[in-house]
Image (cartoon, helix red, strand yellow):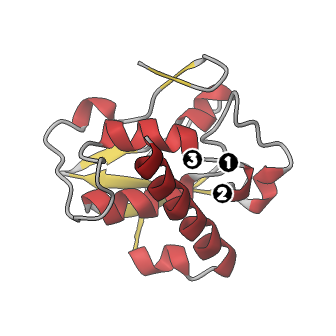
């Protein structure tokens, strides 16, 4: 069971499908499962890695996944492969997640559960990995998340 810094139980969508997912890179020594990545990201996600429109209301203690979807989906893709998908949310905005071994995995799904905001994973649009790095701010936040994860792995 995972917990936020405040002690609130937290998990992610598709956790039951992650057995058998294997790492495709030699980077990120110490990350060998999706669960291990999620555990480490709970210590790495921060206001600075959140989507700019989410930063003002970001609460790392209670809702660390808030505004972290694009950079997290990119990181999951880089470590475990699969594809990146996006959906359009009611009220505007987009949400990114992964599909690995024909199953959806969404490490940032809890941001919606926290606010009792229902989300449907289909229909969705598959996007190229490069698409997630086209926006300069997203690329900077992704690079910061990678740096924070590497520091966490070296210290932990």
Say if residue 78 shows up in the picture.
yes
Tell me the tag on residue 137. Answer: none
State the SS at label 3.
helix
Q: Quadrant of residue 40?
A: top left
Q: Position of residue 107 (x, y in %)?
A: 45, 43
Q: Position of residue 102 (x, y in %)?
A: 21, 51
Q: Residues within 10 Å of mark 1 (few under 14, many from 20)?
A: many
Above-or-below relation of 43 to 116:
below
Instruction: Please report the residue visible at 27 percent of the width from the left and 29 percent of the height from the top.
Output: 16
Q: CA distance from mark 1 to mark 2?
A: 5 Å
The residue pinned by badge 3 equals 44
The residue pinned by badge 1 equals 46
Above-or-below relation of 16 to 147:
above
Tag 3 near tag 2, CB within 8 Å = yes
State the SS at label 2.
helix
Q: CA distance from mark 3 to mark 2?
A: 9 Å
Say if residue 108 shows up in the picture.
no
């Amino acid at each position: 069971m995972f917990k936020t810094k405040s002690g609130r139980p937290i998990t992610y969508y598709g956790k039951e499908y992650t057995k058998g997912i294997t790492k495709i890179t030699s980077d990120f020594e110490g990350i060998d499962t999706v669960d291990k990545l999620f555990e480490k990201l709970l210590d790495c996600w921060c206001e600075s890695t959140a989507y700019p429109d989410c930063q003002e209301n970001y609460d790392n203690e209670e809702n660390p996944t808030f505004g972290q979807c694009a950079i997290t989906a990119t990181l999951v893709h880089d470590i475990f492969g699969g594809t990146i998908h996006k959906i359009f949310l009611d009220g505007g905005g987009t949400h990114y997640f992964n599909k690995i071994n024909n199953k959806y995995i969404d490490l940032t799904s809890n941001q919606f559960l926290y606010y009792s905001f229902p989300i449907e994973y289909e229909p969705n649009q598959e996007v190229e990995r490069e698409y997630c790095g086209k926006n300069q701010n997203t690329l900077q936040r992704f690079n910061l998340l990678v740096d924070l994860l590497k520091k966490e792995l070296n210290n932990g």
